[in-house]
Image: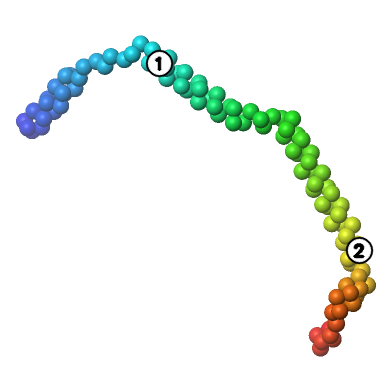
Amino acid sequence: MQKRNNNLEQHLEVLDSIKEVKVNHFFKHKVLRKIEQEKEMDSKVYSWVTPNLQWAVLAIVLCINVSAFYYAFNTEEQTSNPNNIEGFAQEYNLKSQTSLLN
């Protein structure tokens, strides 16, 4: 127990011997300025993403989607006709063979 007390007292003496650190008077200002510069760099990266640009991109994407749906549903009516399949087979000389399953 005595040994532990001596060891503890030695550690506390080491803590008492620590001296105050002298800091440059302008250290805080330098750190704050660097933080502000980093924030400005981050804001420059996303500065071109404005709400107007976002609306324009949204409008373009919607137009593309609407035109894709319009094209898909219009071509579905044309390709659903069995005559188109027969015409396709004749055009490429594809012969249909009857099987036992049909």
Which quadrant of the figure has residue 4?
A: top left
In the image, what residue occupies the spot 84% across and 79% down? 94
Q: Quadrant of residue 63?
A: top right
Q: Residue furthest top?
A: 25
At a point 55% along the width and 24% down the height, the residue shown is 40
35 left or right of 25 in image: right
Front one among 62 and 102: 62
Q: Residue beneath label 2, please?
A: 78
Judge whether residue 82 can be spotted in this image.
no
Query: Which residue corresponds to the image point at 86% horizontal and 54% vertical from the top-left?
Result: 71
Question: Which corner quadrant holds the N terminus?
Answer: top left
- The CA span between labels 1 and 2 is 74 Å
Q: Which mark is residue 1?
A: none
Amino acid type for the residue under numbered disc 2: Gln
Percent of width and height locating residue 62: 79, 43
Residue 28 appears at what percent x and percent y?
Answer: 40, 16
Q: Which is nearer the N-term, disc 1 or disc 2?
A: 1
Tell me if 12 is positioned left or right of 55 in this view: left
Badge 1 marks a residue whose secondary structure is helix
The number of numbered discs placed on residues in the rendered structure image is: 2
**Would you call the spot at circle 1 few (<14 residues within 10 Å), some (14-19), or many (20 or more)?**
few
Q: Secondary structure at mark 2?
A: helix
Position of residue 61 measured from the top left corner of the image (x, y, whole percent): 77, 43
- The residue shown at (82%, 52%) is 68
Per the image, the residue denoted by label 1 is 28
Residue 76: which quarter of the image?
bottom right
Circle 1/circle 2 CB separation < 8 Å: no
In the rendered structure, the answer to whether residue 10 lies left or right of residue 71 reads left
Residue type, label 1: Lys
Residue at the bottom extreme? 100
**Residue sitting nearer the eye, 77 or 43:** 43
